């Protein structure tokens, strides 16, 4: 792709990956409509995700042969026609304050990387008192982004690995744990994907590893990150993440053949 010219206003694509996201996709896309284009890459939704996305003007492309999040992001990149691209998940919303920051970053024309941090919305409550400042790269200038690696928690490969990093001050609202039902499904998905990633690296696992890592994670989130201030939603948020850590380690030992044959390809 040619480098951005200075004679025209820099443009922005917001890219979204979907799979059976009909409950959240409308709100997600509506929060992204300030962009010059919204692109959805769908992994084979059986619900109304695609129809809803198209009704809101998003460009929808289908890639049903799932090979991981990184591969889906790479496929999305080939459809991007803008100078910048922001990656948004279907369970996230861009609020007006973050929108203003994204627009300012795009208008700057800089070949940098911008990161966002999450404000978790769990079980009906924004967890505003939970201390969480871990940021993830989301906005890139398209001509510096080579692609992604990784099945889950994918890594961006850049033409300039030392590109300047910025962190947006405003949070990206993340609705990853709205119900117990969805949390149980995500528990299975992310535990197994995380285990597969570690199996490829030859890591060991087991019940003891799981108990130690999950106990520490629960204490870290519930006590040190102050999730206890959010009542029941704060407890459930911490508990489900701790369970993910436990089952990831347990699966490394007891599901290793399955991980190798089905998830590590």
Image (tube, rainbow, N blue to C red):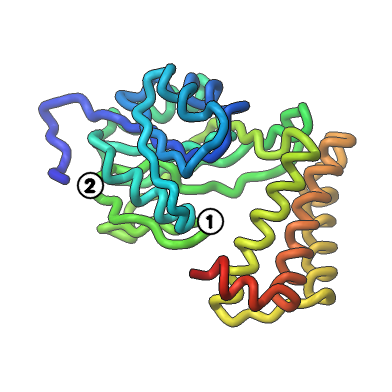
- Tell me the residue that label 1 is attached to: 153
Relative to 221, does residue 9 appear above or below in the rendering? above
Image position, residue 112 (x, y; %): 32, 46
Image position, residue 69 (x, y; %): 48, 53
Of residues 140 and 182, the one drawn nearer to the viewer in this rendering = 182
Secondary structure category for the residue under label 2:
helix
Residue 219 appears left or right of 167? right
Image position, residue 178 (x, y; %): 73, 33
Relative to 80, does residue 200 appear above or below in the rendering? below
- Tell me the residue that label 2 is attached to: 143
Q: Quadrant of residue 161?
A: bottom left
Q: Is residue 121 visible?
A: yes
Of residues 141 and 194, the one drawn nearer to the viewer in this rendering = 194
Q: Disc 2 to disc 1, how far (Cα)?
A: 22 Å
Label 1 Cα crowd, 10 Å radius (few <14 / some 14-19 / many 20+): some
Q: Tell me the residue at 44%/43% (across/down).
A: 138
Relative to 251, does residue 127 appear above or below in the rendering? above
Which residue sits furthest front? 46
């Amino acid at each position: 792709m040619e480098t951005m010219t200075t004679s025209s206003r820099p443009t922005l694509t917001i890219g979204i990956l979907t799979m059976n996201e009909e409950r959240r996709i409308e709100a997600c896309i509506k929060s992204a409509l300030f962009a010059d284009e919204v692109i959805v890459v769908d992994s084979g939704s059986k619900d109304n995700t695609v129809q809803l996305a198209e009704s809101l003007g998003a460009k929808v492309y289908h890639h049903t042969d799932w090979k991981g999040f990184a591969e889906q992001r790479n496929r999305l990149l080939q459809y991007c026609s803008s100078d910048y691209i922001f990656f948004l998940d279907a369970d996230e919303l861009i609020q007006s304050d973050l929108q203003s920051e994204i627009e300012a970053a795009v208008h700057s024309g800089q070949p940098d990387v911008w990161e966002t941090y999450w404000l978790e919305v769990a079980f009906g409550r924004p967890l505003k008192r939970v201390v969480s400042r871990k940021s993830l790269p989301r906005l890139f200038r398209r001509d510096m982004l080579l692609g992604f690696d990784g099945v889950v928690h994918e890594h961006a490969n850049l033409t300039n690995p030392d590109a300047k990093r910025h962190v947006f001050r405003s949070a990206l609202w993340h609705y990853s744990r709205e119900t117990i039902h969805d949390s149980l499904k995500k528990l299975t998905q992310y535990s197994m994907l995380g285990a597969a990633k570690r199996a490829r690296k030859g890591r060991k696992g087991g019940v003891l590893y799981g108990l130690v890592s999950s106990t520490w994670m629960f204490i870290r989130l519930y006590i040190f990150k102050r999730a206890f201030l959010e009542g029941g939603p704060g407890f459930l948020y911490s508990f489900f993440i701790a369970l993910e850590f436990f089952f990831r380690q347990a699966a490394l030992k007891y599901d290793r053949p399955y991980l190798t044959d089905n998830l590590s390809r």
